[in-house]
Amino acid sequence: MAIIPNIELETKLTLHRLLPRLEKTFEHSISTDPTGWAEFQMRLKRHFPKLFNLYVEIYNERYDLFFHLEDLVTSLARSWFQRPTDLRALDNAREENPLWFQSNQMLGGVCYVDLFAENLEGVKSKIPYFKELGLTYLHLMPLFKAPEGENDGGYAVSSYREVHPPLGTMEELASLAHELRNAGISLVVDLVFNHTSDEHLWAQGAKSGDDEFQDFYRIFPNREMPNLYEQNLREIFPDEHTGAFTFFPNLFKDGGWVWTTFHSYQWDLNYANPAVFNRMAEEMLFLANQGVEVIRLDAVAFIWKQFGTNCENLPGAHVLIQAFNAVARIASPALLFKSEAIVHPDDVVKYISPEECQLSYNPLLMALLWNSLATRKIKLLSQALATRFKINPNTAWVNYVRVHDDIGWTFSDEDAASFGINGNDHRRFLNEFYRGRFEGSFSRGLPFQENPKTGDCRISGTCASLAGLEKALKEEGPNEVELAIRRIHLIHGVILTAGGIPLIYLGDEIGTLNDYTYLDDPAHERDSRWVHRPKTDWNQYAKRNIQNTTEGRVYQGLKQLIELRKQHTVFSGGELEIIQTENDHVLGFMRTYAGKRSVIFANFSEAPQTLAFRIIEQTSVTSLRPLHGRSKLTNYRELKLEPLDFVVFG
Ligand code: GLC
Ligand code: GLC
């Protein structure tokens, strides 16, 4: 890309040209809201250089660059004038305390609106429950207008400004955001910005032959380019369609091939067109103005395409997200981004920075927790925490054990090789194990998107079913039930203490099992992820405070861990140091924060384990108080760890 000579001067000149034009356009708003205008100008001046640089980096070859830039800045000002005063106050508060999300008080939850509580009003009525659990962050799965029937769980958006009618209205969403905020809970929603549904107005425009809208997508008149692109592309949903393109007979004269990374009805947007960036920035700011505090940027890896590459994790994707970030800093400063990059760990971290995504899913920790449960060994997990957990101190991981998606084994082959483990073979083992087909497996998982060409496969299933609860309840007995519950607590214990925001997939806190009824629904039967997306059974939830029920045991144990986190500030921030426990089954790590220290041990084996006196000495455990766990120090100052125990000193 050509670099503009003397970019500083150009930045200054451009802003000087833009400001008077904005003043004219917004004459009326400026006169009624002069303070708002002053605030906007202040932030625009501060962040414009960044935005301009990024925009120019992507679009410098466009002859109409200034037109699109002015269009963008106009949208920012318009959106700012529409921003409610309470949200402007939140903007100031967040700017003063930008690391608020690193607090040990933070706890995330995620659910589907319809499955959890029918509709948005239903979700509102569950606020007392969210408070009981301790949530401060609630991710509602895509709730925007989407096609009837198959819509990838809402990830095919037909309008970003309308709530899917059965769930409620945009006014209800804004009101819910407000109520949640009053309860100390930040609302998180997706910005599905890599693609729209083929029923979105833009796609409809493209279908009807409008070439301006055809340029919103990547559409080709024949197979020539798709064939060339596909030489380097991964297949994401091979069960649904091979390759990355879908033929639509009504496009152009003789039909056209649309880029569809995911399902055929999810059309990838063309960000090489600045109009697409501008329109999506408007959608994002619109959501921020409804009170959304965190945007989950869906499928970030795929948004930039470049011929001759695999079109994943390209530098252009980062420039785009940074440009969206600059947009937010100017017109909705409270807004944070969470990256959804379920890719190689080297690539995951590239999205994380205060200028790009302040938050990121931690798919590596997730996958390796399950790996440790299967192998009963901690070496890969310990290595990953030692070498890959540290990120920019002004950002945070979102640590989870399950979400609505399948589990992909995204560990690094090179890391595995350092222990003599072959990545592909090991993935095959994990898939067999979690499908319950390997000896010693406790799991009841299902395959997802098994690709016969590559042997690749991912795993679906709820936390409880993967951790052994389903098998134990249906085929085994009380001992196995106890072990399964310990597994659930063990892995949640790690995500609640490791540093970052722990995220609970709601339902997991009461041990929800797989739900096989998805097989009866034609819209879902081909997508095994629905096995872990059951409709919430509130009768089951009612048992959460009854001691001897399975629900009660899972819930009470988890509540103890949540309270442990919330009572001790040492679980804030992200400083983590690995302890070499000299025991293959026991993970050890130390957390420090503001002069406080905590030592954690997690036994991934069903057999008792012992940590030597030396390890206890080195970590000065005896100078700390035991805060959690069944295990005890012996008279010889060894630590005797109970099966699958999670032990915390602090
Ligand atoms: C994300 C979502 C997943 C969806 C995909 C396509 O990865 O988590 O559920 O299928 O994006 O939008
Ligand atoms: C692929 C994508 C990921 C998405 C998943 C959905 O793994 O990389 O973004 O969540 O598919 O199953």
Image (cartoon, rainbow, N blue to C red):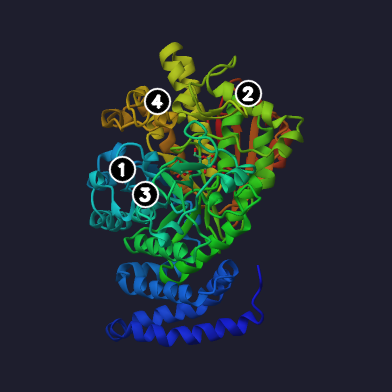
The circle on residue 513 is: 4
Q: Nearer the viewer, mark 3 or mark 1?
A: 3
Is any part of residue 632 visible from this angle?
A: no
Q: Identity of the amino acid at label 2?
A: Phe
- Rendered position, 524 above or below 187: above
Q: Nearer the viewer, mark 1 or mark 4?
A: 1
Q: Identity of the amino acid at label 3?
A: Val
Q: Which residue is mark 3?
A: 157
Tell me which label, 3 or 2, sits earlier in the chain: 3
Q: Which residue is mark 2?
A: 429
Q: Which residue is mark 1?
A: 113
Q: Nearer the viewer, residue 206 or 632?
A: 206
Q: Nearer the viewer, residue 437 or 155?
A: 155
Q: Nearer the viewer, residue 633 or 195?
A: 195
**Mark 2 CB within 8 Å of ligand 2:** no
**CA separation in Å, label 1 and label 4:** 19 Å
Residue plotted at (42% across, 28% down): 526
